[in-house]
Amino acid sequence: MKFIDPHIHVTSRTTDDYEAMAKAGVAAIIEPAFWLGQPRTNVGSFQDYFSSLVGFEKFRAAQFGIRHYCTIGLNSKEANNEALAEQVMEIMPLFLAKENVVAVGEIGFDDMTALEEKYLRLQLEMAKEVDLPVLIHTPHRNKKQGTYRSMDIIEEHEIPPHLVVIDHNNEETCEEVLRRGYWAAFTIYPKTKMGNERMVEIVKKYGPERIIVDSSADWGVSDPLAVPKTGNLMLERGVPQEHVELTCYKNALAAYGQSGQFEESDWLTPEPIDQRTLFEGNSVLRGGQAPRVDKPEDDRIIQ
Amino acid sequence: MSYTPVQLLENWILRQASDSGQAWLDTQREAVATGDLKSLYMAFGFAPRKIGKADLQLTERDYNDAAEARPGWMPHTWTIDQAARVLLLMSLPAEDDAAFFVTLEKLFQTAEIREQICLYQSLQLLPHQELFDDRLSEGTRTNVKSIFESIAHHNPLPMELMSEQAWNQMVLKALFIGTALDPIEGLDRRVNPELARMLIDFAHERRAAKRPIPVELWRVAAPFADEIALEDMKALYASGEQLEQSAIALALVSTASDEADDILKTNPEIAKRAESGEITWRDIAQQAY
């Protein structure tokens, strides 16, 4: 079975993870712009980070057979540095039109401050201007309140719910998110967010419609195989295969496909090798590295 | 009649673009011409969505027109969005060279891979090219082969702008990452003793590691070959694979030294083919990659 991990921060992961993900069936991933664990002190850090999301990381993933997409946004924590936030908003037009950008995000609330709200609203307007879906990060603390408030604001800006993914849901928030017509995403993240046994129960209870499973794997203790592991657990515990396909693949495709930049044909029928671009194999097969060989090698030998 | 690069790009796009794509581009070019940077940044990004990504359908006549409009310009790999993006850049006010430079650098610094390829190919048509010699060298430090090739291949700017040091690094890196030398414009014109020394050292490294030596290397190394390099060539000419023998023959023919002649005599049949033009560097590059 093929999987999409529509929320993973691979920039902080190694190529070993890519190899394992490809082997587990992950065909495409989306990397939402995020914070780095420590606050960025100047706009240059954002610029280089965004550049890596639309450039090098897409290239690196392709070398391991995975299509990489991303979302671009000013995250909620760093919206609290107003001087910096203003500069980030200025450079966002340079990135929103890039080819693998499938949404504005992840944006929303952390502490629910006035500045967080200001930049959430400004970025919602930006998403309308460039006709892209929105990815909403919901806070760890005061989650229910933060989730509801985010949806209220989106409705004030008249963005239809089918264009918005509300992420990091739990048993407390998902009913209202689904009731209001949004895509409800769940993060399978060890210890802090959602475990995959709980996820199986949620799909059994609410059905597969508009539910999306992701890993959010990042620099923390997290699992880049969370989506395939959850999909397989669902099958093991009696969730019908078509429900697994919806929650671990098709719903993400439908939600982010609304950007016009996220199409199944990208990975099912990849474009041929093209020396002008970066498609699969271009560098691996013809560069200074050894070509990928599909037979086991003696891993004691480094050539 | 001769055309300007702008006229050629406009004609090529007109042939292939939809009416709506064409109208979009016209509007964006007008906005950019007023110095509106936000319009430039957005339009530069959105060009493929609005105008498509097809290859430009060019004829021999178009290639000749291009070379006449801008010597060295070879738009053989250009796409329609690339042409549109270059027209947007050419619409940008350029009287203030410092401001022009800053704007272009901003685009370079935030460009994804296809955009970088476009930007490096665009410089040959833009004003103030002389300000971008460091940018070209920076670009060759990439680890993305297609970006490297957008600078090194079918691009007259490295030949025109790069310092000898940067030029030498570019040629060596091309061999190092396994890309062809033949499409480098001015390759034979800018050979120099230091470059030949670097390439001969590289050949020795490869031999020590029991890795093959790229055959095009001899084209650049041979004109300044020292005794050791001649020994290497002699050995390869005697026992190498056919492509290696052909490359060595061609390299030795062009040096026209007594030592080269002595080596060529050891296999007169290949030497004859090299002398008669039956073997060319283009053929060798095509077979090698």
Image (cartoon, coloured by chain):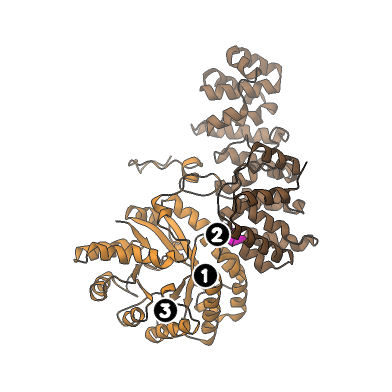
**Residue kind at label 1, given as amino acid type:** Asp
Q: How many marks?
A: 3
Using the numbered discs, state the Cα–Cα distance from disc 1 to disc 3 in whole angstroms: 22 Å
Q: Chain of mark 3?
A: A
Q: Which residues are magenta?
A: B44-49
- Helix, strand or loop at label 2? It is helix
Q: Determine which residue is flagged by label 3.
A: A138
**Residue at (67% x, 64% y) in the render:** B27
Using the numbered discs, state the Cα–Cα distance from disc 1 to disc 2 in whole angstroms: 12 Å
Where A238 falls versus A293 (above or below)?
A: below
Chain painted brown: B
Instruction: Give residue A131's mark.
Output: 1
Q: Main secondary structure of the magenta part?
A: helix
Using the numbered discs, state the Cα–Cα distance from disc 2 to disc 3 in whole angstroms: 31 Å
The quarter of the rendered structure image containing the N terminus of chain A is: bottom left
Dots 1, 2 in contact, CB < 8 A: no
